[in-house]
Image (tube, grey):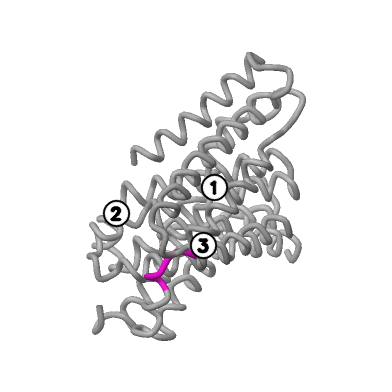
Amino acid sequence: MKGSLIILSFFVVGIILGFSRFLPELLIENDYSMYALYALMLFVGISIGADTSALSVIKKVKYKILLVPAVVIIGSLLGAFAVSFFLPYKLNELFGVASGFGYYSLSSLILKDICGAEIATLALLSNIFREVGTLLLAPLMAIAFGKLAPIASGGATAMDSTLPIVITASGKEYAMISVFSGIVLTILVPFLVPLVVELF
Amino acid sequence: MWIILGLMTAGMVIGAILRHNEKIIKRVNVLVTWSIFALLFLLGIAVGLNDELVKNLDSLGIHALVITIASILGSVILSWIVYHYFFRNHK
């Protein structure tokens, strides 16, 4: 929670400085966000590669565990489809946003490139809300929709930022499923976002 | 896009090689956090510099919330089905 608030403040401060143009010329002329993303991808890759726990879970639960990320993907896209009738955006744009599964940093940058700044901001906000919403509501979700619900809600964030709340809401037995599902989705986001925008 | 995928893959290979070096991995996790801070800051600047976006931030926010609620509900309802039929008897 605290982490999410700090991240949000960096975003808000950025907006304020950008809006007031209270910045060195260099930052106004150039957009360095892609480089920050490249760095992030490298470091996230390293931390995924170094993770020893996720793989061992598969041996125990076998194929069933793949249902979890699958359900997140299908469910998120179904949700996006449902709201496409009420919101002023194209279906493929909404699919792109929903395919972030909470991974706001990567999904918004990718969408900035293919769909423009407006959809990128939509994705950023929507996926931040997804992470924060999971953090706030996980216990209620576990009660109302079962112990996989917080993991499904967290999406890609289930591997790290929402993992603690998953453990709190569903129990530590679900930690490994959460990490596995989160990692699978995290890896899939850079593939799925451009794909769904292209396809629909 | 390929640069992003390539970097992530390269990272995974490096991570697998370094997996027993706890000190480095801890440092990398710190770097992940700071990269996110940097990225969100730069993204904020890009949004702030864009007058059209700033004007529409409030409606974008509400639309984003609607998309989030729908996506979460979709995921969570389907997860209930999987939980009920596949995970109930097993932890």
Q: Residue A130 carries which label?
A: none
The answer for which chain carries disc 3 is B
The amino acid type found where label 3 is placed reads Gly
The amino acid type found where label 1 is placed reads Tyr
Q: Is mark 3 on a helix, strand or loop?
A: helix
Q: Quadrant of residue B72?
A: bottom left
Point out residue B30 in the picture as x, y percentages from the top left corner: 44, 44
Instruction: Point out the image quarter for the C terminus of chain A.
Output: bottom right
Circles 1 and 3: CB atoms closer than 8 Å? no
Point out residue A150 in the picture as x, y percentages from the top left corner: 34, 60
**The magenta stretch spans which residues?**
A49-54
Q: Mark 3 points at which residue?
A: B15
Q: Mark 1 points at which residue?
A: A104
Q: Residues within 10 Å of mark 2 (few under 14, many from 20)?
A: many
Q: Is mark 2 on a helix, strand or loop?
A: helix
Determine the CA span between mark 1 and mark 3. 23 Å
A148 left or right of A39? Answer: left
Q: Is residue A185 magenta?
A: no
Q: How crowded is mark 1: few (under 14 residues within 10 Å), some or many (20 or more)?
A: many
Q: Name the residue under label 2.
A: A165
- Relative depth, front residue between A5 and B23: B23
A85 left or right of A130? Answer: right
Point out residue A7 in the picture as x, y percentages from the top left corner: 46, 36
